[in-house]
Amino acid sequence: RKESKHYVIAFSQCIGDDAWRATMLEEMKRELSFYPEVTLLYRDAAGNSQQQIAQLRGLVNDHQIDLLIVSPNEAAPLTPMIDSLFQANIPVVVTDRKTSSGLYNAYVGADNIAIGRLAGQYMQHILHGRGRIGTMRGLAGSSAAIERQTGLQQVLDTAAGITLALDLNGDWTKETAYSLAQKNAPALAKLDLILAFNDQMAMGIQQALRENGFMHQKIIGVDALAGPANGLQQIQEGQLFASLLYPTGGAEAIRTAIAILEKKPYVRDNILQTAVIDKENAELMILQSAKIQEQQLDIDKRQALIAEQQKIYQSQQTRLNILVGS
Ligand code: FRU
């Protein structure tokens, strides 16, 4: 492999402290291990748009960054700052959430309008076209919440038999969903189906309903993340009814970033696959992700071995040079 240059990639994450984004970062780091000369500057805005703006300012003022990967917490407040960086010729890769302007070099993530639509169609299918549903939306100003809502609305507009009977505004977190569901437990329990815009909120609702003695609620989420206590497992255990796969795209974001930096061809809109995961295919997904995980660990081990051998080789070279007096 050709030696990569000493590029500095800045990654501004809207909120670091959740399993889905931890997975994204892990995927990024793994992909970056193929480019040992590339530095990743990571900032976690902890779900605060003003903090994310300040961190972006800090990244460009205090560092020589070659490219920015960013997942904007809320679209509108982050747009002027990210646009100004793009206009200052810093390549921008947006991931998962977008700004409102479309000024970026590349997007990596699933199509959130399609996810909203697919969720709507799936609910229609489960309810045989008739029923009362409820939603728990994500953080109002974040593009993923806006787009999922748009997609869902497209289906609701044509689904005469489906009524949106309860529409709650969450903020993507389990905690907020839990406390909203505590307050609305009887109303939620009367619904035929509940769609939470992510699995974390679905789990918050599930917990609140359980604590209020309502057991058999059909709750659908989004993400279907692998790993203990995450969406896939919750589906398999019957805690969640279904989820829509929302890949994190960590590896793809890095690959796109490197292509841009190395002036190679790249795709502007990298749309990651989605799918409905329910009890029928959760098991298969779990097996697949376990297999990938296993192979990944194997690759990690091999890489560590190669790195060690390189070190030994280098120190032998140095000794040899001393011996021959060069
Ligand atoms: C993680 C998350 C996901 C969701 C995405 C939307 O922080 O809330 O659960 O799918 O962000 O941007």
Image (tube, rainbow, N blue to C red):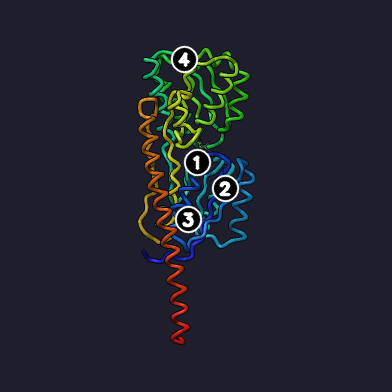
How far separated are the C-alphas under marks 1 and 4?
30 Å
How far separated are the C-alphas under marks 4 and 3?
46 Å
Q: Residue at x 40, y 40 (%)?
A: 290
Q: Residue at x 48, y 22 (%)?
A: 219
- Nearer to us of marks 2 and 4 is 4
Q: Earlier in the sequence, mark 1 or mark 3?
A: 3
User: Residue 114 appears at what percent x and percent y?
Assistant: 40, 32
In the picture, the disc for residue 192 is 4
Amino acid bearing label 3: Pro
Label pair 3/2, CB-CB below 8 angstroms: no
Q: Mark 2 points at which residue?
A: 80
Amino acid bearing label 1: Arg
Query: What secondary structure is found at the residue carrying circle 2?
Result: helix
Q: How crowded is mark 3: few (under 14 residues within 10 Å), some or many (20 or more)?
A: many
Amino acid bearing label 2: Pro
Q: Name the residue under label 3.
A: 91
Q: Which of marks 2 and 4 is nearer the N terminus?
A: 2
Amino acid bearing label 4: Asp
Q: Earlier in the sequence, mark 1 or mark 2?
A: 2
User: Residue 225 appears at what percent x and percent y?
Assistant: 46, 36
Q: Which of marks 1 and 4 is nearer the N terminus?
A: 1
How far separated are the C-alphas under marks 1 and 3?
17 Å
Q: Name the residue under label 1.
A: 97
Looking at the image, residue 203 lies above or below residue 287: above
Query: What secondary structure is found at the residue carrying circle 1?
Result: loop
Whether disc 1's CB lies below 8 Å from ligand 1 is answered yes
Residue positioned most to the bottom:
325
On the picture, is 54 further left or further right than 116? right
- Identify the image quadrant of the C terminus: bottom left
User: Residue 37 appears at what percent x and percent y?
Assistant: 47, 63
On the picture, is 200 further left or further right than 258? right
Q: Residues within 10 Å of mark 2 (few under 14, many from 20)?
A: some
